[in-house]
Image (cartoon, helix red, strand yellow):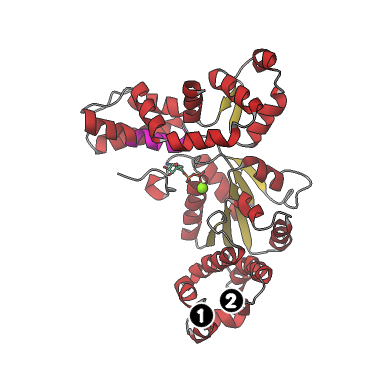
Amino acid sequence: MQQVGKPVTGRDFIGREKELALLMEYMKMGQSVVLIAPRRFGKTSLVLEVLNRLKKQKYYTAFVDVFTNPILDLLSSEITEEVLKNHKLHKQFIAAKNSATALIQNLKLKAVLDDFQFIIGFADNTKNEWDLISESIDFVDAFSKKHNSKMICAYDEFGDIGKFDPKGNLVKLFRSKIQQHTHSTYIFSGSYESVMQNLFISNKSPFYRLARIIHLSYVEKEPLCNYLKKRFTQIKIKITKSYPEQIVEHTMGHPYYTQLAFQQSVLFHTFHGRLPDIDELIVQMLDVEKDYLEKVWEDISNSREYVHTLRAIAENGKNLYKRLKPKKINVARATKKLEGMGFLFRDNIRGWFISDPLFQQWIKKNI
Ligand SMILES: Nc1ncnc2c1ncn2[C@@H]1O[C@H](COP(=O)(O)OP(=O)(O)O)[C@@H](O)[C@H]1O
Ligand SMILES: [Mg+2]
C-alpha cells in the first residue's frame, strides 16, 4: 500500500485538472505564480506534477525546497544542484563540491565551470554566503539562457525564506534578480498563508505584482470517489456504493485525509474482518493524527480569542457575532487572523468553517 504523506505524482495524482491546466498555461506564458494553501492540501504534489509534465515538453525544471535547507549555503547548493540536474551533472557536483581540486579536475563539469566559475566557491569556506546565494539565484536563468532553453523553477515553502534573514534582505535580493530573468518562470508555493500573503499580496512587499496568486482548495469529489472505488476493488474489499461518497463527504475532498481514510479503513478491515462505519473510521483517524492535531492546537490555543472562535466555528459557522458576544471577543479580528493562518475558509452556505476537517472533529470532541 502506498504511504500516506509523501507528495504524489503521475498515476497517483488525483483530480486538479483545472489547476494543472491553469498552472501549465501560466508557465508557458512566462507568468510566475504563487501557490497558497494550508499544509497537506497538495501543493508540493501539484508543483511536482506540473514540473514533470513540462519536463516532458522539453522545459528545464528545478525544484527547491526552502524548508528542508536549514542554512543559506545549503539552499544555494540545492539551487545549483537542481539546475545541473537538467544536464545530469548534479551527481558530479555533489561528489566534488567540497574540494576545489576535485571540482576543477572533474572533466564532465569542466564546460559548466568555464562559464559559471562561482560554482568553485562551494568548495571555498571563506566564500561569502551572500555571494553564493546571489550567484545561485541567477544561475537558474543564466544556465537556461546559455542552452537556449526555458526554465520552470519552483521554490517550495518559500514563506520559510525569512528564517535566513529576518530583515528581509534575501527576499529583496530574490525579487531584484528574478524580475530580470528572461528565460525562467517561477512557482512560489507555501503554507503559512499570512507569510505568503505578506510576501506577495501586500503592496509594501518587494514581490508585489510579480506573480499571479492561486489559492489551492480541496480536490474535486468525483475523481476522489472513483479513485477510492478503484483502490478497494484492486485489493478485493467489497464496499457499498455509498462508502467512497461517505468518506469524501467527511474529508470534504481534503486529499491527505482521503488517502488516510482509505489506508485506515483497510487496516480496520484487516483486524476486524469488516470495514469501519464512518464514525468508527473518524475515531481511528483522530487517533492516528492525535499528536499532529494536539501540536496544531498547542500553537494557537494561547490566544483566548482563537480558542473561543474556533470552538464556535467547529460547531457552526454562522451567527458568530451573536453567539460570541457574551465572551467579548473581537470576532472580525480573530476570524481574519485565523483565515490568514490557513485555519479558516468561508463560503456562502456554511459561513466560516475550519479548513482541516479532522481538526474540526478534534475540536468538537476535545475542547
Ligand atoms: N492530487 C492529489 N492526489 C492524491 N493525493 C494527494 C493529492 N494531493 C495531495 N495528496 C495527498 O496529500 C498528501 C499531502 O500532499 P503534499 O503535496 O505533500 O501537500 P502540501 O505540500 O500542501 O503539504 C500526500 O501525501 C498525498 O497523500
Ligand atoms: Mg509541501
- Prevailing secondary structure class for the magenta stretch in the rendered image: helix
Residue type beneath disc 1:
Leu
Q: Quadrant of residue 247?
A: top left
Is residue 198 rendered magenta in the image? no
Q: Position of residue 169 (x, y in %)?
A: 73, 59
Q: Are marks 2 and 1 in contact (CB under 8 Å)?
A: yes
Q: Nearer the viewer, residue 160 or 42?
A: 160
Q: Quadrant of residue 152?
A: bottom right
Q: Is residue 203 above or below residue 355?
A: below
Residue of label 1 = 109
Is residue 352 visible from the viewing direction of this image?
A: yes
Query: What residue is rendered at 64% in x and 32% in y?
Result: 339
Figure disc tally: 2
Q: Which residues are magenta?
A: 254-263
Residue type beneath disc 2:
Ile
Residue of label 2 = 119
With 177 as the anchor, is 287 left or right in this view?
left
